[in-house]
Amino acid sequence: MDSEFFIVSRKQDVRLALTQEQFKELKRARKRLSSAYAISHKHRLVLSNYELILEAMRALGEQYVRQENIQAIENGKARLNANINNYVLSARIFTSQLKRHVQGCVPQDRDLVNVLSRKMESEYKRSFAYRFIDSLYDYVAHYGLSIHTIKITSEMKPNDVQQYERHFFVNAYIEKDYIGGPAEFRASVFNEVSGTLDLIDMLTSFNESLTRLHDQAMDLVRPVFVKANELVNEFISVFVSEHGNKHANLFVVHGTPMANDKVYDKFPISMYVNNHNFGKEYV
């Protein structure tokens, strides 16, 4: 049965014909853009979960200061623990899938993936926070809570009219005594823990490692990403010049030229072009 290849508006009322080779080029470009998008998106997910932790800590501190009922405070603790668990999960997703996404951008170049592997090993060795938070994922997934102690402190500070006001600060800590020992926590990392760890200090340092890995990965894929972005933009521009901007939400299709088209393959392209998920340096 004959096949046809085309770009179609989501509204399904206008098309732009493609050759089979153009279809293959767009499919490769879409895979590269999708992989680069995944790197950036998953990094942003980690940072967003970090902000949610800070918000949950502020809210919990306010509950303590207002001396709300014990149930409200316990709910606040549970919310904070949930945010931390979501953070370590998103961090594990980012680190465990990072090399796969880079490989998706440069499938024929194992050397670039090896460069990233060495960078990840370097971050793991240089940063105790990296090793600890990476280990924390397995711990909270199977054994216990991610925080053990909440501490509220306060101090008097002058305001804009030079009157003193009391400011409250909340800190969360992980304590070695409550982790459970090397049988439940990665033994090599457990042995490095001494006493009490400030959660935000650990997460801040870990974020710095993940940001360096993100930047390294994006630098490695930048050349193929730029070419893929230019290719897809070119086809979208041709489509829009023929049919107008109202049809800009586009898909690439491999189907049959029958009255009731049978679709063998279909994927979006316009959603990956000039995506605001990327920084200005990437688009």
Image: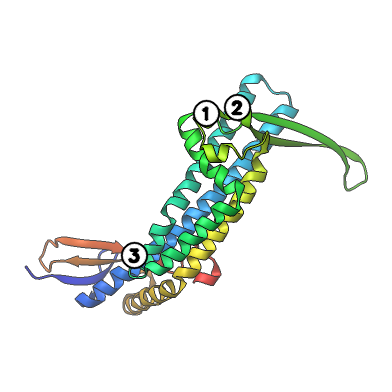
Q: What residue do we see at 63% from left, 41% from top?
A: 55
Alpha carbon separation for disc pair 2 and 3: 45 Å
x and y percent of residue 56 in the render? Answer: 62, 37
> Are the residues tagged 2 and 1 within 8 Å (C-beta)?
yes
Up-down: is 83 above or below 9?
A: above
Q: Position of residue 32 (x, y in %)?
A: 37, 67
Residue ID at (61%, 20%)? 71
Q: Secondary structure at mark 2?
A: helix
The kind of residue tagged 2 is Tyr
**Percent x, y of residue 84:** 56, 38
Nearer-N-terminus badge (2/3): 3
Residue 176 to residue 30: above or below = above
Q: Which residue is mark 1?
A: 144
Q: Quadrant of residue 21?
A: bottom left
Mark sitting earlier along the chain (2/1): 1
Residue 247 in view (yes/no): no
Circle number at residue 178: 2
Q: Which one is in front, 181 or 245?
A: 181
In the rendered structure, the answer to whether residue 227 lies left or right of residue 177 reads left
Q: Position of residue 171 (x, y in %)?
A: 70, 36
Find disc 3 in the rendering and name its residue: 31
